Image (cartoon, rainbow, N blue to C red):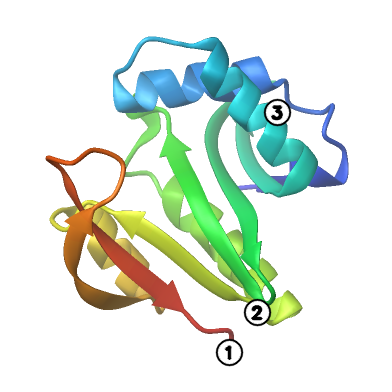
Amino acid sequence: MKVEQSSDDPTTVPAEDLAQLESLAYGVPYSEWQRWFWEFGKSYGRVFVVRSGVRPIGAAMLLPTMAQTVYLETMVVHPKRQRRGIGSALLAKVVSYADTHQVILELHCLPKGKAIRLYEHFGFKKQGEPTPRYHPDVRYQHMVRSPS
């Protein structure tokens, strides 16, 4: 499975396609804000993409936060393509990027479910207890991975 780093050429994957993928994966309506955010990520961070033909079926966005730290802002896989190794392939590329550049990876995710186990498998460690982040009623687990 090939994982591309679209940040090398931000025109290769339209932000609209990435926003539509995110809408499908999270079950939320498509919005112009999502399109803009993916455009921002392609311009100022790193976006990694797995495709089926020309359409993205998986994507991950890294954004710089501080010196030597990047934030895994989002990682999405098309709902019909989940549980086939796409998320693992994306995360392996993200971890490789972080190790090559000797940067710390940070993320927030829901505290229960398969994502925690996947992140732990790739060397992420839980930091503290889950806390509200994006919505006051939903708690997220902060996780960190140091470069190897």
Query: Mark number for residue 110?
Result: none
Q: Could you tell me which residue is drawn at 32 percent across and 16 percent down?
A: 28
Q: Earlier in the sequence, mark 1 or mark 3?
A: 3
- Report if residue 80 is visible in the image: no
Distance in Å between CA atoms under marks 1 and 3:
30 Å
Q: Count neighbours of disc 3 (C-alpha within 10 A) and say few if under 14, some if 14 to 19, many if 20 or more.
A: many
Assess disc 2: are there few (<14), some (14-19) or many (≥20) residues with their C-alpha within 10 Å of its C-alpha: some
Q: Nearer the viewer, residue 94 or 39?
A: 39
Locate residue 49: give its quadrant: top right
Q: Which residue is mark 2?
A: 99
In x, y percent, where is residue 34?
53, 22
**What element does badge 3 sit on?**
helix
Residue identified by numbered label 1: 148
Find disc 3 in the rendering and name its residue. 39
Q: Are marks 1 and 3 in contact (CB under 8 Å)?
A: no
Q: Could you tell which of marks 2 and 3 lies nearer the N-terminus?
A: 3
Q: In the image, what residue occupies the spot 60% across and 19% down?
A: 35
Residue 138, x across and y down, in percent: 16, 43
Q: Is residue 54 above or below residue 136?
A: above
Check disc 1 and give the amino acid type. Answer: Ser
Q: x, y (%) of residue 47?
A: 67, 44
